[in-house]
Image (spheres, rainbow, N blue to C red):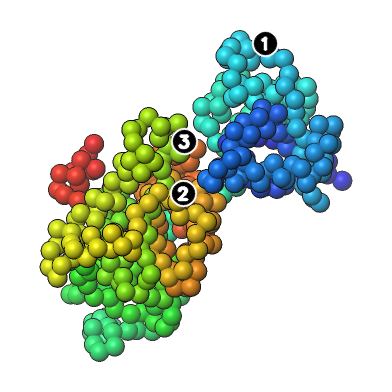
Amino acid sequence: MAARKRKKLYVLDTNVVLHDSTCVYRFEEHDIAIPITVLEELDQFKKGNESLNFHARQFTRLLDELSHSKLFNGGVEIAADLGRLSVKLEQDFHPDVIRNFPENKPDHRILNIAFCLAEEDRKRQVILVSKDVNLRMKAISIGLVAEDYKNDQVENPGTLYKGHRQFEGLSDDLLCRLFSEGGSLELSELDSKSDVLPNEFLVLRNGKRSALAFHDAAGGVIRRIDKEICYGITPRNAEQTFALAALLNPSIDLITITGKAGSGKTLLALAAALHNRSNYRQIFMARPVVPLSNKDLGFLPGDVHSKLDPYMQPLYDNLAVLQMHENNGRAKCIKDMLAEEKLVVTPLAYIRGRSLVKIFFIVDEAQNLTPHEIKTIITRAGEGTKIIFTGDIFQIDHPYLNSHSNGLSYLIAKMQGQPLYAHINLEKGERSRLADLASSLL
């Protein structure tokens, strides 16, 4: 009989709990240790309406439900087929830890507890789990195994679903039929390309002509797409044309648009929102405030709105671009909608908890959201609501997220192929020749 695999012991950092309050259920049969320092740090996050505060409260309740009195005495079984959970008290600093990290700070106390646990049982693998790359490097420097929390990460962001693809060598007959009245083809006519996903966009070519199309999930056919001017904005490339087609399609409720700075993500979403404004009660434009601490906001002068305005300015910049198109009183329309709160520009934290019924909801810089925050936003959607997440998964400002673990990457990986969802990656910058050159060369 094969020897039974020895259980590992995972020591969790505070940021893991604040990222996912259900993290203790993600380590299979292995045991989990929570340093007492983590509980002390969670106390600082219990009050508030941010995602961090939610996770702090939820995790504290979870510990209480698992019989908190036994957590300090050998631990308790988390669930059937899972390991044991225990809370570990402070220990005197180990000489190898204090020699390298003499400062008495929470990260070093967590590191010390993990190191002492590894020293107590050298036959058992002890792993420190943290989303803080600096703490992981410190752990590795003193011989301790350290890992990132990978439960909700995508394996390779570079191979994420792009939302569009190209087919070459189509017959003249097929392309002519696509341009004829009706403008559609059966999916099977694309050489039986059955792997084309619902709402995936297509560039169809032969040596003489080309067409833009998409797999219409509602109709089950390949349908031609025409370039459309939207609230004064004309798409400049195929990907922008695809993005507007998805944004204006009433059968698609959830859209993600990715791309580098200047590719037109937010501008296209806002133009589509204003174009279809009669179909919605309100248009919300929101973005996460990074950094997410009140201390950082406190250095800015004025009331809370004055403090938050700098974070919202990129959204107002996009509104200014649309107001430059004076035809049919568009500038006045935008001003009136802002005054009447039909168009609301706000930090994302102010949206949480609201019921989103018949709302066109644009979430900018979504790469700075966690998977749980993305889920929280989408699950608030009521009837008639359309949600658009825009961002660049390779431009992360959040201290504990990266291109693998951010909520936008996670959403794209999980939602592709769903009939209510569409994604498009904008590959070309269109802000200006100078901006595009700098993005490519610098």
Determine the residue positioned at 75% across, 32% down.
87
The answer to whether any part of residue 191 appears in the image is no
The answer to whether any part of residue 432 appears in the image is yes
Determine the residue positioned at 48% across, 51% down.
407
Residue 29 percent across, percent down from the top left: 76, 45
Numbered label attached to residue 293:
3
Numbered label attached to residue 349:
2
Q: Amino acid at mark 2?
A: Ala
Q: Residue furthest left?
A: 327
Residue 178 percent across, percent down from the top left: 27, 83
Q: Amino acid at mark 1?
A: Pro
Residue 147 percent across, percent down from the top left: 59, 35
Q: Is residue 134 above or below residue 417?
A: above
Q: Amino acid at mark 3?
A: Ser
Determine the residue positioned at 45% across, 31% down.
295
| Side (left or right) of 12 relative to 141 | right
Front in this rendered view, residue 304 or 137? 304
Give the mark, 3 or 2, whose residue is nearer the N terminus: 3
Determine the residue positioned at 19% across, 44% down.
435
Residues under labels 3 and 1: Cα distance?
Answer: 34 Å
| Disc 2 residue crowd, few under 14, some 14–19, many 20+, Cα 10 Å | some
Residue 175 percent across, percent down from the top left: 25, 81
